[in-house]
Image (tube, grey):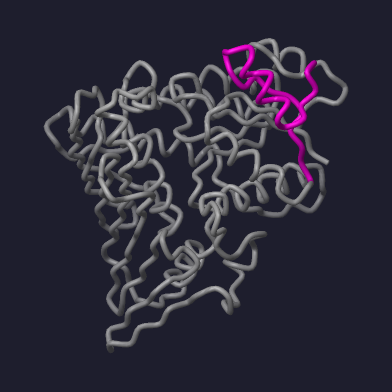
Amino acid sequence: MLTFGLIGGGSISHSHIIGATFGNNAVLKAGCFSRDHHKNLEYGKHYSVDVGRIYSDYQTMLAQEAQRPDRLDFVIVTTPNNSHFEIVMACMNHKFNVVCDKPLCTTVEQAKLLQQAAAQNDLICATSYTFGGFPFIHLAKSLLDAGEIGKPYYMTLKYYRGSRLAEIYANNIKTWRFTESISGQGGTIADLGTHVDYLARLIVGSDIDRVLARLINKPGNVELDTTGTILFNFKNGLEGTILIAQAACGHDNDIEFEILGEKGTINWNFNRHAEVRVDYLDGKTVTHRDPGVDSFSVRQFDLKGPNVLNAPVTGFINIYSGYKNAILSKSLTEKKDFYFPSLDDGVKGVCFVEACIKSQKVGNQWVDLD
């Protein structure tokens, strides 16, 4: 049985806990859940955490947990963006494996320091790109790799949400995502853009080489971008477009990608996330839908079909399954590969965000990624 701690306590933390505890092979044993003493205790008690392992600050938590004979196997970090670097680095310095909510941190310099620390301490670390845990995204990748639509030449990705619009006008506390001192340099480009950047790299199997970004700070009176259009080129020559918006009324996790090839098109949509549609040059359309898909790309996951109550939990469960198996197998002689978005994936996401911001600042010009 693995044990883990949690630093953070926002709504996303509950999804992390569900994902980490699925399968009954991991349990939450410690945490620093809120600056508010009462809320901190209530959160911990809700998950049956012993009161002696509910901490008022993460520094004390890490120092004391590191000395325990039953020390934690990993720590989950779900705090606002501006604190990720400091907290994750502290976890690494105490030699804890870490899962960090995306974005990994706020600057490329910070990201590379975390990458070095993880390697030096031989740690297994993950970045929670939720939608990478959806099995049919991996099916789309396998179809592309198998040449189902011939040579691909263009990719489009979209992520629209409307839930932030009312928050912007109401000046709700959640507008921290558009406040630089808390979110970092990027608003929607960091919150949504980093998700689709990861999906693009995962599916195509190549890194993004350069970007041209147009980021918009409308509507309302916010510091950071709410909407964006990004042109990008992969290192393998494929080109594409990303559309993102946090204030798109009528949309809720509206995520979609299409890959255009010489012989057809592959389509995946979050609202039908347990299927992949392929349109062919001869006019034929084939929909690969759960159940009935016999492919390792789907079979490898614990949760294959849709979770109708909370669809994003599907991603968390499958990501944590791979992550926990990686920790459990670390000491084995025979190494196996388990899927989860890595720390290196998080570093690449920060490079993407920073390049998009630079492109906006220099007048929407092409910028190479570090």
* Left or right: residue 21 compared with residue 112: right
Residue at image x 72%, y 18%?
A: 54
**Residue 161 horizontal/vertical position (percent):** 33, 45
214 left or right of 31 in image = left
In front of the other: 254 or 148: 254
Q: Is residue 255 above or below residue 170?
A: below
Quadrant in which the C terminus is drawn: top left
Q: Out of 169 and 156, give the one closest to the viewer.
A: 169
Give the residue displayed 43% in from the left and 39% down from the top: 348
- Location of the N terminus (image quadrant): top right
Q: Which residues are magenta?
A: 25-52
| Residue closest to the eye, 228 or 48 | 48
Q: Quadrant of residue 63?
A: top right
Q: On the picture, is 277 further left or further right than 1?
A: left
Residue at coordinates 40% horizontally, 27% vertically from top-left? 108
| Residue 153 percent across, percent down from the top left | 27, 66
* Residue nearer the viewer, 234 or 301: 301
Residue 121 x/y as whole percent: 68, 26
Q: Residue 296: image x %, image y %?
A: 61, 70
- State left or right for residue 81 relative to residue 66: left
